Amino acid sequence: MDRRAFVSRIAAGAASPLLQYAAEAQPAPKARNVVIVHGLFADGSCWAEVIARLQPKGIQVMAVQNPLTTLQAGVEATQRALALQQGPTVLVAHSFAGMIVTEAGIHPNVSAVVYVAARAPDAGEDYTELAKRFPTPPASAGIVWSGDWGRLSEEAFLRDFAGDVPADKARVLYAVQAPFKRKLLADKTTHAAWRSKPSWYAVSTEDRTINPDLERFMAKRMGAKTIEVKASLASLISQPDTITNLILEAAGQT
């Protein structure tokens, strides 16, 4: 049995028919609000290409500036943004921000959750242990530490984070990446919004930061409407039309 088949069997076993039915049978209500959250090695500007495509569609977009210190701090920043929304809101995560969306997505304003090459743990799950079931992606070796604060080296950023983004644009993104606190990596969620909210997932097939098979596993387990994008982790930058369309679908706007 090849690895893809093995992973598929694990995913099929972990995703109960009830969870799959819930995701498929409960279409998200139409939403005009989108709150988006960035992950590690980035700041809110990484969503600029997607924001520029959502706004002309009449979507009100708010980007959370994730403090990258603790999971709780990120959740609180996201909850403040959600509290400002009037009506149904699609909550979108990239990369590490999947931890935040999984926790904060239970907010009553949230009508759907979207994961873009993002972590999607279950409540109380140790994501690090989950990730160990799959080969370690190359980007992990490129983290440079200064005390308790980490960031990707320029070489790792250009190669592993944004490998399909033009080099001049990728260097700008590298320059604005926000450092993250080491303890952030050990935090765990206490809720799993994808168990009760309609969910969408964009797998990045060329991801060198999160193993693509791990992304497939998480998407299958949550019963998410899933697409595969031939892109690096930075699909929201290299293929913004595809990611925008996925968000619009979650908002009931397609």
Image: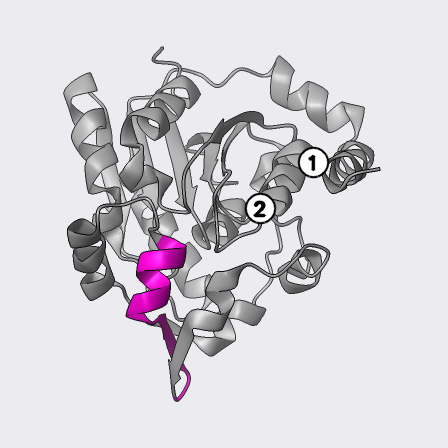
In the image, taking residue 32 as reference, residue 205 lies left or right, namely right
| Residue 248, placed above or below residue 205 | above
Front residue of 52/240: it is 240
Residue 180 spot, x, y in % from top left: 38, 71
Residue at label 2? 120
Q: Secondary structure at mark 1?
A: helix
User: Which amino acid lies under the numbered mark 1 shown in the image of this protein?
Assistant: Arg
Q: Which mark is residue 234?
A: none
Residue 8 can be seen, yes or no: yes
**Is residue 63 or residue 206 the one in the foreground?**
206
**Is 153 a magenta residue?**
yes
For label 1, the residue is 221
- Relative depth, front residue between 153 and 91: 153
Question: How is the model colour-coded?
Answer: one colour
Measured as percent of width and height from the top left, residue 99 is found at 51, 53
Q: Residue at x 32, y 50 (%)?
A: 80
Residue extent of the magenta highlight:
147-161
Q: Which residue is found at the position 20% from the left and 62% from the top?
A: 176
**Amino acid type of the residue tagged 2 in the rendering:** Ala
Which structural element holds mark 2? loop
Residue 166 location (% of width, % of height): 22, 46
The reply to whether dot 2 and dot 1 touch (C-beta < 8 Å) is yes
Q: Is residue 30 magenta?
A: no
What is the x, y in percent for residue 241? 29, 25
Where on the picture, by quarter, is residue 58?
top left
| Residue 39 shows in this picture | no
* Quarter placement of the C terminus: top left
Q: Tell me: residue 224, above or below residue 215.
A: above
**Residue reaching furthest bottom?**
147
Residue depicted at 43% across the width and 55% down the height:
75
